[in-house]
Amino acid sequence: MALTRTSHTRDDYSAAAPSDIRQRNRTAVLRAIYPNVWCSRAELSRITGMSKVSTSDVVAELIQDGLVTEGGYQNSPKPGKPALLVGFNARSMNVASVDISEADGMRGIVTDLAGDVLERDQEPIVEHMPLRTTQVVEFCERLVARAHAPVLGVAVATPGTVDEREGVVLAAPNLGWTDVELAALLRDRLGLEATVANDADCALFAERCFAQGSENMMLVQVAKGLGAAMLIGGNVVQGADHAAGEIGHVVVDDDGPQCVCGKRGCLETLVSTPVLERRIAQEPGHRDDVVADAGAILGRALAMPVAMSNISEVIVAGPEDVVDDGMARVVRDTINDMVRSRFIGAVNVRRSQLGADAAALGAVAFVMRDQLRIL
């Protein structure tokens, strides 16, 4: 898995305040070498601003924990013993991650700390409203059992509004969930740290961490529902009520189909995986027209937030049978026709580079951010 090395300032590597010196110094060292940078202890001391003694102590502790490993010796024209290099040990721990946003069921992966997928699993979602939380927890439990190393944490990418700090799904109409304390359920059952986040936020964060994404971009996740996420200055925008990006239930057609939320003509009644797959099945000879119509609707809906945020990159993620290059082109052309001016330049629209794994990989990245503070 190719990772983007997140840009850090010297403050990101700086020595910690007395109150949390141990954790912050560990973080400084890990950030300096993640994901695949090899440094001597002396170089780490210069990068982090820590003393050589403190650096050696932190490195020794991280080696003992398995997160850092020693490699070869540094080539140097200077006389004397060459310096021993240390690097991040991505295989030291695993993360189990589940995406429950897809229309056809749950998708699970087990990865190492570099985001490389080691195991995969899938399970259909039993047609039941609300979705049984026990099915999600048991699926996570099965993934954890397939891990190749100690598990750092478990993560779930879910549609709907999520209090990511508390791990509570506040509202997910497509799952029939309201105020579901999913992270607590996972912690109690598995005895592991648990992260629960919105699927679009996850997919966006994955593009940033694992696919060289911009610090300022938007992602639209076409799945069982439809959601969006925005990254500004490298930070995922959450909103006052954890609802930033919930564009799926914005009405775009007053006379449109009935939505599960109770309104008519919501965006996801026109642009979501089940809707588009059903239309394609009904009109197999007009597949490209169906996808293009959906792209135009989506492009019109995105024009205003693109203009307001001055975002220059939009990523469209979803199943390849509906979210293809043709849809991305129509979304791009529609946005630029409506927004481009002497004030705002052309917007680039592309498909996700991570495919069906995007949301699950983003959930993995959130675990590493929360537990190791390296992303």
Image (cartoon, rainbow, N blue to C red):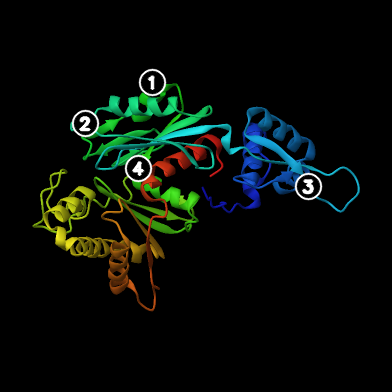
Q: Nearer the viewer, mark 1 or mark 4?
A: 1
Q: Counting residues from the N terminus, which is met first, the one under dot 3 or under dot 4?
A: 3
Q: Give the residue type that dot 3 points to.
A: Gln
Label 4: how many Cα within 10 Å (few below 14, some 14–19, many 20+): many
Q: Position of residue 194 (x, y in %)?
A: 43, 30
The part of the image, by quadrant, that contains residue 284 is bottom left
Residue 72 vs residue 60, the one in the foreground: 72
Q: Nearer the viewer, mark 1 or mark 3?
A: 3
Residue 139 vs residue 217, the one in the foreground: 139
Residues at marks 3 and 4, CA–CA distance in whole angstroms:
43 Å
Q: Give the residue type that dot 1 points to.
A: Arg
- The outermost residue toward the left is 255
Q: Nearer the viewer, mark 3 or mark 4?
A: 3
Q: Nearer the viewer, mark 2 or mark 1?
A: 2
Residue carrying label 3? 74
Residue carrying label 1? 189
Residue carrying label 2? 126
**Residue drawn at point x = 47 percent, y = 52 percent:** 208
Callout 1–callout 4 Cβ contact below 8 Å: no
